[in-house]
Amino acid sequence: MAADRRPAAATASLSLTVLTALAPVSWGTTYAVTTEFLPPGRPLLTALIRALPTGLLLLALVRVLPRGAWWWRSAVLGTLNIGAFFPLLFLSAYRLPGGMAAVVGSAGPLFVVGLSALLLGQRPTARALVTGAMAALGVSLVVVRAAGALDAVGVLAALGATASMSTGTVLAKRWGRPAGVGPLALTGWQLTSGGLLIAPLALLAEGPPPALDARAVGGYLYLALGNTALAYWLWFRGIGRLGAAQVTFLGPLSPLTAAVIGWAALGQALSPVQLLGMVLAFGATVAGQLTPRPSPVERTVPDDASPAGSAVPGARPAGRAAPGTPAAGPAVPGGAPAVVRPPRAP
């Protein structure tokens, strides 16, 4: 019976990974949409329009507000994933030449590996470190250009954006979701709180928004609905069901998508070195999704893995659990019970 469930579980996991991957693929279209459709020199306005209207729309749809500790948790996540990340991302894109912001951003998996060790107690493996370094190298080969000197403010902004999003990813995994609250509501909370943080900054730094033509309105609608509402819902849904590092290893798909769009739609040629970088980065993305299969010994749960006398519907009698069946673990703060999985093979 357990063996029959494994192919179905593998298929479900693959489907979830593919859907989550659509988020960074969508984000890879941001640069082309910004340069081809939106008014120039408005990074904070673009960040605001991506966040606040979408967040308010989602709140109107779900009609669920945070409760208790989730008021400050959603504010923290909204600041990290939206309020700080969006402006820093656009600032670095405007100030760094030749996609250097994407190079810094490709270090995200390494940030998450380190933060997962600190906040989630997950010991980094050699494979995770090597795969993260390979992703960063691959993206670097794709996007680096030898044009101009690096801008210190741009580099710091790119590092800040990467650190902010990585911290938000790990904290979202640590806190989970409140009982009965879906990823759509969690996305709305974060977009709204992050947008409210950006709004006064955009007004003070850039002034009132300019007159928008139909092309700009279409670009903003795409960024707000497809590139933000749908993409972040898929991203936060993936964080809740996959590992934090596993989700972050999908990040290199964003600059790779930008490179492909630049080649296919904007006439930007790809050199052999860039093609090699794409292969390395994509290979690292795939490797980041692979989980070593536990040995038969690791799949065995000790007799005392769960409290005596606990009644779980459908549970086996006290003793060894069926091979491949994880044990119920401690509850994630504010979320559903966690799952204690067998330790990964070295």
Image (tube, grey):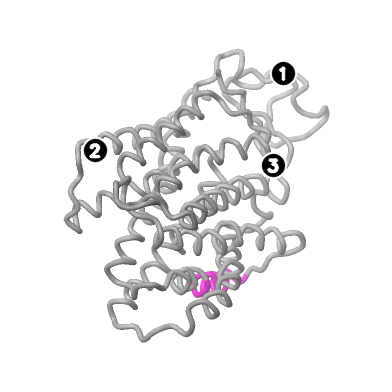
Q: Nearest the camera: 67 or 8?
A: 67
Question: Which quadrant of the figure has residue 123?
Answer: top right
Residue at the limit of the structure toward the right, as seen here = 309
Question: Which quadrant of the figure has residue 250?
Answer: top left
Q: Nearest the camera: 12 or 314?
A: 12
**Mark 1 touching mark 3, by CB under 8 A?**
no
How many angstroms separate mark 2 from mark 1 (CA)? Answer: 49 Å
Q: Which of marks 2 and 3 is nearer the N terminus?
A: 2
Q: Position of residue 211 (x, y in %)?
A: 36, 86
How many angstroms separate mark 1 from mark 3 (CA)? Answer: 19 Å
Q: In this view, does 243 lie to the left or right of 12?
A: right
Which residues are the magenta region? 52-63
Q: In this view, does 159 lie to the left or right of 260?
A: right
- Where residue 302 is drawn, which disc sits there? 1
Q: Earlier in the sequence, mark 1 or mark 3?
A: 1
On screen, residue 269 above or below 292: below
Residue that carries the numbered disc 2 in the rendered image: 275
Residue that carries the numbered disc 3 in the rendered image: 337
